[in-house]
Image: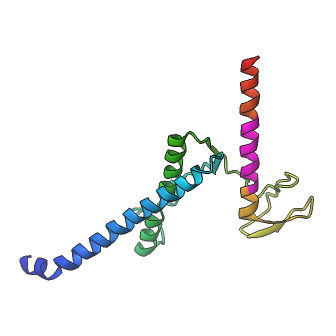
Amino acid sequence: MHTWWRSYSRKYREIHNRRRKQLTHRKHFYRETAAKLVNQQRLIVLEKIDLSRFAETRDKDTKLSNKARAQRFLGAVSEFRDAIKNAADRDGVPYIEVNPAYTSKTCSDCKVLNKSLKSVKEWTCTSCGVVHDRDINAANNLQKMGKQYIEDVKKQSLEVLE
């Protein structure tokens, strides 16, 4: 054991330190980016997604390799979402999570739901003929949900004042 430790301890420490530096860098990047978002002083709207589905672990029976699992771990979307939540709470910026159901399948122009969509990147609305990129369309729908939320809050505050 002592011989092994002498030959491999330096390599072991280098690998351990590299991983620690990656994790520290990622957390710092997430906090910086969240602070930049919150400094704009605008409502932040995110989809309420169960991120545990993306956190594949070794004990699950999946086809992911260990390298793919490690890369998912290094992505850590939940840490970024938590950094945004914390920064928004700290600076008093409104933050809401909305139901993600059909945000990319609902036309942001005419509100028609296209349930027959599979996993295509672009689609054309059958009602109004507008060509949508799914990600941009979902972002537009989230923006509209955020505006609706603000209007609802304003109505409720006016009703309380009356």
Q: Main secondary structure of the magenta part?
A: helix
Q: Residue at x 45, y 70 (%)?
A: 71
- Percent across and percent down for residue 8 are 17, 80
Closer to us: 61 or 93: 93
Q: Is residue 139 left or right of residue 85?
A: right
In this rendering, the answer to whether 42 lies above or below 80 is above
The single residue placed furthest to the top in the displayed view is 162
Residue range in magenta is 140-151
Q: Is residue 139 left or right of residue 96?
A: right
Q: Residue at x 11, y 80 (%)?
A: 6
Q: How is the image coloured?
A: rainbow
Closer to us: 112 or 90: 90
Asked if the magenta segment contains residue 89, the reply would be: no
Q: Residue at x 49, y 58 (%)?
A: 32
In this rendering, the answer to whether 26 lies above or below 89 is below
Quadrant for residue 28, please give it. bottom left
In this rendering, the answer to whether 5 lies above or below 60 is below
Closer to us: 105 or 60: 105
- Percent across and percent down for residue 49 are 59, 52
